[in-house]
Every structure is written in C-alpha cells, then in structure tokens.
Image (cartoon, helix red, strand yellow):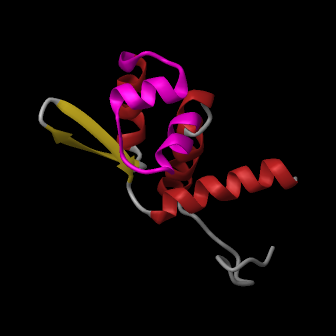
Amino acid sequence: MNTNLMSDEHIKLNDLQAQQVAELFNILGDASRVKIIAALLKGSLNVQALADEVGISPSGISHHMRGLRQMNLVRAHKQGRQVFYSLVDQHVEQLFQRGVDHVLHG
C-alpha cells in the first residue's frame, strides 16, 4: 500500500507500539466517542454543548472524555466552572477523516 503517509518500506511495530495502536482503535470503537470527535471538529466545546450535540448526558460525556484524554486525542481546559474540550491536534482530525472516508467510499 502506497499513500502519502507511508513509503514502500514495510512498517514494523514492536510489541508496545502494536499495543498502543490497538488501544487507539479500541477507544475509537465506540459510536458515542466517534460522535464526540465529530462534534469537536467544529472547535472547542463545553461538556453541556457536547452532551446536547451527541445526545448523551453530561456525566456520559465526562466518562468518555477520560478515555479520549488518556489516549491523547482530546485536551481539556477550564473557563471558570466550565470544562471545554478540543482535539489535541490535526493528527486526530486526519485520523478521524480517513476513517470516515474509508466508510463513505469503501
């Protein structure tokens, strides 16, 4: 497979790297988390706005965010008493977009 991200060289992962990639895909294997990431493509949102957008409770959002933060996919920042979340960087957006493209055009 030859894409812009990979050369013709074989990708070899050690056991730790393979485990980390598996954990990444595992955390993305939940429809609510996928909806959360899709919502965050628009920019930083607070917990209530995410709950409204995704259709789950604020406590459900907080639960999902723990896993997304642990995998370094989202970051949190406080403004007063509210917690806002955003995607960590464009790598997350690109990974998500490639997954969506695969589903839509696969």
Q: Nearer the viewer, residue 50 or 37?
A: 50
Question: Image check: 71 left or right of 24?
Answer: left
Question: Image check: 106 left or right of 66?
Answer: right
Q: Which residue is found at the position 40% from the left and 30% from the top?
A: 49
> Eyeballing the image, is 82 above or below 7?
above
> Eyeballing the image, is 26 above or below 51?
below
Q: Which residue is found at the position 78% from the left and 54% from the top?
A: 102
Residue 26: which quarter of the image? Answer: top right
Q: Which residue is found at the position 51% from the left and 29% from the top?
A: 53
Q: Nearer the viewer, residue 7 or 84?
A: 84
Q: Residue furthest left?
A: 80
> Eyeballing the image, is 80 above or below 106?
above
Instruction: Give the x, y percent position of residue 18.
Output: 56, 54
The stretch of residues the image draws in magenta is 35-59
Magenta segment main secondary structure: helix
Instruction: Give the x, y percent position of residue 46.
Output: 33, 35
Q: Magenta includes 51? A: yes
Figure disc tally:
0
> Eyeballing the image, is 103 above or below 13?
above
Q: Magenta includes 11? A: no
Q: Which residue is found at the position 38% from the left and 23% from the top?
A: 63
Report the quarter where the N terminus lies: bottom right
Instruction: Give the x, y percent position of residue 37.
Output: 52, 43
Instruction: Give the x, y percent position of residue 32.
Output: 56, 28
Q: Residue furthest right?
A: 106
